[in-house]
Amino acid sequence: MTSANLDIAFNDEQAMIMASAREFCRDQSNITAVRSLLTSNLGHDPAVWSEICKLGWMGITIPDHLGGSGFGLGALIAIVENMGRYMLTPPLISTTLAAQALLRGGSDTQKNQWLPAIAKGCCATLALLENEDWGADIKLSAIDAGDKITLQGVKKFVADAQAAEFFIVSARYRDQLMLVLVEANRLPAGAITENILIDQTKRASTVNFSGVTVPVTACLNHIATTFRDIKLIGALLHAAEATGCCATSLDTIVSYLTTRSQFGRLIGSYQALKHPTVDILMQMDSARSLIYHAATLIDGESFSIDSEIACRMAKVQADEALLFAGDRAVQFHGAMGFTFDCDAQLYLRRAQWCQHQYGDAQHHRKHLAPLLLDATHE
């Protein structure tokens, strides 16, 4: 069997970033602010997004010669975890993934044009899915049109599409997988249709790219490794967000168990409620260990087998921890927990949404098995 790398580290920069992120997210995203954005168009407050950009969060993973600070992906995990804890939902994850795609596969021209813009606050996203299955074949096609290519097809569940200034789109070109950069201003009117999501704090859309023409120079390079890496990074970032949300779900449970009385006793005194609460804590701590283990391994130009294993394990554990925490939060609140006014609903809905972002537990276990058993990975 594989002897996996078990390193885990948390440096001074990460500690400073975590402290700053915790304070900012707590101040900007209390539960009242979260609920006020549920019916908004973008799902986030543009003023808060502007403050995030001023803090330099968008440039953390971008090298300094391209306008960022160059701290790397590992430093971003602490921010995303706190975003999850306070249910703050700016387009940071989707934009970071687009930036990582450019860092790994973009041309020098693409990097010089778009990465400094992202560091200053330009929003972007990935358009990868055509259905709910992360293992499905890509069918959106790219057709030769002289020195240009024309796209034909639709992408679904495109995160933060309404806010994005450009998309990184997966397509089939001459029977080969490709990634192509499409500026939002090339889309015709009505090309973006908002999806209805179970998690109303999030935004995603169906985007019709049919008829959109881009120059050949819009294509990215190193497609196979870039595509693999951004899917693993996406899984890790959503694992970090889920872990943070699990923490706030646990806080809500503990607060309720220590204030609600039944039959003359605090309900938190009953073992039937104590034991699952401790289970949530243990699962959450395991998820935190795994996301910071993965954060220790992922910085660099390419992923190793160890870093792939770490990202997949983190996603499995974080998904299952939040699903359990969200379910218990609803159940422990009794009949009130099943109403939309109860905050436990937000955590359960986030759990249902998060598990399907960049693969659920079953998807990642399927890919983990051959890696851990030294079998051929397909």
Image (cartoon, rainbow, N blue to C red):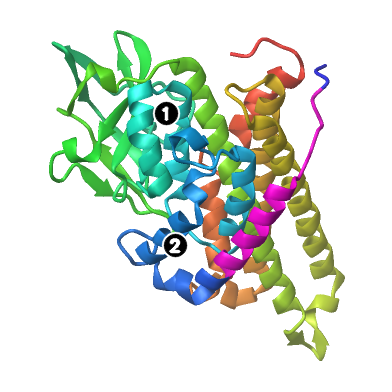
Left or right: 336, with 226 as reference point? right
**In the rendered view, would you say 54 is above or below 166?**
below
If the image is split into quadrants, where does the N terminus sit? top right
Left or right of residue 372, residue 346 in this image = left
- Nearest the viewer among 241 and 319 is 241
Q: Is residue 189 above or below residue 269?
A: above
Q: Amino acid at mark 2?
A: Glu
Judging depth in this view, the residue of 328 and 11 nearest the camera is 11
The three-letter code of the residue at mark 1 reads Leu
Q: Which residues are drawn in magenta?
A: 4-26
Q: Is residue 170 visible?
A: no
Residue 48 lies, in percent from the top left, at 43, 64
Q: Which residue is under mark 2?
A: 51
Q: Position of residue 196 (x, y in %)?
A: 35, 54
Q: CA distance from mark 2 to mark 1?
A: 24 Å
In the image, residue 339 sits, relative to residue 284, either above or below, namely below
- For the stretch drawn in magenta, the main secondary structure is helix
